Image (tube, grey):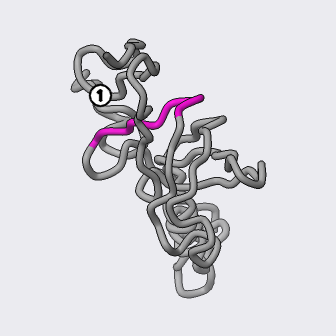
Amino acid sequence: REGDKGRGRDGRDGGRSDIVEGRAERERDRGGEGVRASKRQRSDSGSGEEEGAGPSGHSWLAPFIKVRVVSKLVRGGRLYLKKGTVVDVHPGNRCDVTMDEDRVTLQLRQSELETVVPKESGGYVLVLAGPLKGQRARLQ
């Protein structure tokens, strides 16, 4: 029958919808949006949240800032409290970090990092949140 094209004898679609749903779940697990768009992507509320900012809605990642690894799970704890520089920011609160010691580049989550503030006065910083986000400043 024409209306049952692609369906089995019992009228079901042969599991095709399960395949699409499984693919959507895998995409979400990898940080993608999957087959369906998220509510935030569909709504155009202009709330100021950044895309892929996670549960808190706030992503502070920016290229060329200094960060410290605060997760003991990264490389078996060998990089715990080691410093690096963000070289690229990806959607889903991920970024590429080049470590200062061995110059290796890793992709890490924002939750595995913290910002580094210069110790000496006169050091430059980048404002990462609030109304002055993106502005450069000098410590005094």
Q: Is residue 93 magenta?
A: no
What span is colored magenta in the figure? 57-65
Quarter of the picture holding the N terminus: bottom right
Name the amino acid, label 1.
Ala
Q: Secondary structure at mark 1?
A: loop
Front residue (pair 71, 16): 71
Q: Residue at x 46, y 19 (%)?
A: 124
From this view, report whether residue 88 is shown above or below residue 84: above
Is residue 95 among what the camera can see? yes
The secondary structure making up most of the magenta span is loop
Percent coordinates x, y for residue 52 in the rendering: 42, 43
Percent coordinates x, y for residue 101 in the rendering: 71, 52
Q: Is residue 64 magenta?
A: yes
Is residue 20 among what the camera can see? no
Disc 1 crowd, CA 10 A, few/some/many (<14, 14-19, 20+): few
Q: Residue at x 50, y 31 (%)?
A: 62
Q: Residue at x 63, y 62 (%)?
A: 2
Percent coordinates x, y for residue 67 in the rendering: 50, 44
Q: Which residue is mark 1?
A: 129
From this view, report whether residue 90 is shown above or below residue 63: below
Q: Residue furthest front?
A: 120
Percent coordinates x, y for residue 12 in the rendering: 53, 79
Quarter of the picture holding the C terminus: top left
Residue 50 quadrant: top left
Residue 10 quadrant: bottom right
Front residue (pair 109, 103): 103
Q: Residue at x 28, y 52 (%)?
A: 55
